[in-house]
Image (spheres, rainbow, N blue to C red):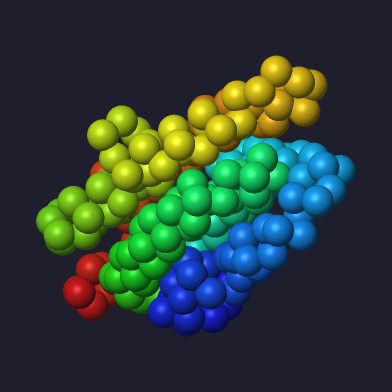
Amino acid sequence: MEAPTPASALIHSSTLVVAGVFLIIRFSVLFEFTIIVNYYLALLGGITLAFGSITAIFQNDIKKLVAYSTISQIGYLVCGCGFCCYEEVLLYLIIHALNKAFLFILVGYIVHYFNGNTDMRQMGGIYLYSFDITVLLTGVCFNLAGLPYTAGFLNKEFLLFQILKDDFLSYLVRSCWLVSFFFTPIYMFILIFVVIFGPKKGTLATYFSF
């Protein structure tokens, strides 16, 4: 996460991290010949999305929090590929790419507000200075959290209805999805309330540099 924010936005939204998922979709004819590989993909995706959402809560670096959010969302895509719902995965991949690129650009604005500092413990009070960032970041976080009436909610619903099968693997994956459904809004709201609505911190030089 030491790269500049535009590079992070490009990498974490639509190029490197989703290249493997896109290759799975392109070679889906081969993956459908073996059910063991599909079971492995579903299990790996479920564990990944639960791990990413739990780990994101304990991050103090704002770019690392968004990066672990990307790991969690890629888990949804890999899990969907394991259940052979490639159209829903491709749709969610596009929506997530747009959201995450926009979120990283907003994070870049916030980092510039605080003189290149990425530690959320030294941030706060953005709503006092930029109403635009407040509204846009809140909307993008709601979308990624999958709250109702958002594109993220609809796409996760498409994927969730594809994995509702009655076998042991589906129950295990569904438990991982429930963990992610619980923790994803938590770390998104941590991002909103600490960075935007948190108490104003830092030296006077930080705020005079706006």
Identify whether 203 is placed above or below 205. Answer: above
Q: Is residue 175 above or below residue 56?
A: above
Task: Count the numbered circles shown.
Answer: 0
- Measured from the top left, where is residue 18 in percent x and y? 58, 65
Identity of the residue drawn at 76% across and 21% down: 167
In the image, residue 77 lies at what x, y percent?
58, 50
Foreground: 108 or 83? 83
Q: Residue at x 70, y 45 (%)?
A: 82
201, 180: nearer the viewer: 180
Name the residue rendered at 70%, 18% in the picture: 166
Query: Could one spot residue 136 in this view of the protein?
Result: yes
Residue 50 versus residue 133: which sits nearer the camera? 50
Residue 162 location (% of width, % of height): 56, 33
Quadrant location of the C terminus?
Answer: bottom left
Q: Is residue 99 left or right of residue 196?
A: right
Which quarter of the figure is the N terminus placed in? bottom right
Instruction: Identify the residue at horizontal 49%, vertical 47% (top origin).
Output: 88
- Check the image and name the residue furthest to the top: 166
Q: Is residue 163 left or right of residue 125?
A: right
Query: 203 or 99: nearer the eye?
Result: 99
Residue 178: x %, y % from top left: 58, 26
Relative to 188, is 182 above or below? above
Tell me, yes or no, if residue 145 can be seen here.
Answer: no
Instruction: Give left or right: position of 12 versus 114.
Output: right
